[in-house]
Amino acid sequence: MYAVFRKELADHISSMRFIILFLLVFLSAMFAIYIAIQTIRSVVGPTTEFIFLKLFTTSGDNLPSFLFFLSLFIPIVGIALGFDAVNSERSSGNLSRLMSQPIYRDSVINGKFIAGLTVLGIMILGVVLIVAGLGLRIVGVPPNGEEVVRVLAFVAVSIVYGGFWMALAVLFSVFFKRTATSMLASLAVWIFFFFFLTVIVGAVANAVAPVDANSSVEMIVRNASLEGSLARISPCTLYGEAIVALLTPEVGSVNPTLLVLSSYSGRMANPLPLMDSLLLIWPQVVTIIALCAICFGISYIRFMREEVRSI
C-alpha cells in the first residue's frame, strides 16, 4: 500500500490538474482575504474578541467570505481527485497489469484514497496558512492559543468534508466504467446538495408551516426549525454549521430555533469556550465521517469483489 500511496501522491502533485486546482483555490483565497482586509475595521470594535478569526469569516458588501469560497471549492477538489481513481486504470488496462503483480487488491484502493486525502489536506492547510500569514502581516493582531486551535480544528473538519466528496467520487469511479460518467454523477450530487436542496427545503418548510409578515414568533420558529432539520440531510449544511460554530464562537448555537429567538431579542450569546464549541459540532463531524466511511466502504466491497480481466 505504501508503494501505491507514493506513486499516487507523486502523480497528483506533479499533475496539471493539481496545479490548476491549487491556483483556483489560491486565487479565491486571495480575493477573500482582500475583502476581509478592506472591511474588517467595520466589524471590529474595541471590545471585539477573536479578531484573528474575523479574517476567515468577514465578508464585504454582496461579496462572500473565505469560508464561502472554501466550502465551494473543497467538493470540487475532492471530486477531481477521486472521480477517475479506478475506472481510468481499468479502461487503460493498467489495473489488470497491476493486479498481476504481488500486491494485495485492497492496497490499491486504500493507497489511492489515502494519497488523494493527503493531497487534499496539503492543499487546504497550505491555503489556510497563506491566508493566516497575510492577515497577520497586514492586520498585525497575533492569534491567541484558542484561536490557533480553532483554526486547526477548522482545517481538520475541512479535510474530513473533502474526504467525503472524494469517497463519493471513488464510489462512482468503481461503479461506472467511464470517467466522464463518474465525474458527472459526482458533480450532480454536489450541485443538488449545494444549490437545489436549499430551495426544496425552503419550499417544504413554507408549505408545512407557512409564514408571512404578520406571522407570530412561534410560527417563524417552527418554520426555521423544520427548515433546519431538513437541511441537515445535506453534508454541505453539516459542514457549514461546524465551521461557523468553530470560527464564530459568538453564535453560541447551531439550532435554528435559538438563532431565530436571539435575532428577535437583539442579543448575541456570549462566546462559547473551545471545548463547548467542539462538543457543539461533534454530531455534525461524526455524521460527515460516517457518510465518508459508508461511501468508501461500499466502493471498497465492490472493488474487492469485481472481476479484473486482462484486456
Image (cartoon, helix red, strand yellow):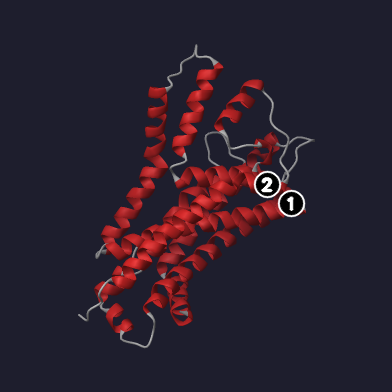
Residue most extreme to the left = 311
Query: In the image shown, does 40 or 209 lie closer to the viewer?
Result: 209
Dot 1: element: helix
Q: Where is residue 237 in the image (x, y as percent from the top left)?
A: 49, 42
Q: In this view, does 301 lie to the left or right of 136?
A: left
Q: From the image, which quarter does the C terminus lie in?
A: bottom left
Q: What amino acid is labelled 1 in the image? A: Glu
Q: Is residue 16 left or right of residue 275?
A: left
Q: Say the numbered circle drawn on residue 184.
A: none
Q: What amino acid is labelled 2 in the image? A: Leu
Q: Say the numbered circle drawn on residue 146.
A: 1
The 10 Å Cα crowd at callout 1, few under 14, some 14 to 19, many 20 or more, is few
Q: Position of residue 132 (x, y in %)?
A: 66, 54
Q: Is residue 76 above or below residue 205?
A: below
Q: From the image, which quarter does the N terminus lie in?
A: bottom left
Q: Quadrant of residue 76?
A: bottom left
Rendered residue at 50%/50% (across/down): 287
Q: Where is residue 246 in the image (x, y as percent from the top left)?
A: 64, 46
Dot 2: element: loop
Say whether marks 2 and 1 touch (CB < 8 Å): no
Q: In this view, does 205 lie above or below 65?
A: above
Separation of marks 2 and 1 at Cα, in angstroms: 10 Å
Q: Where is residue 276 in the image (x, y as percent from the top left)?
A: 69, 45
Mark toward the viewer: 2 or 1: 1
The 10 Å Cα crowd at callout 2, few under 14, some 14 to 19, many 20 or more, is many
| Of the image marks 2 and 1, the number of the one nearer the N terminus | 2
Q: In this view, does 15 lie to the left or right of 150?
A: left
Query: In the image shown, does 21 or 219 lie closer to the viewer?
Result: 219
Rendered residue at 40%/63% (across/down): 297
Residue most extreme to the top = 214
Q: Say the numbered circle drawn on residue 53.
A: 2
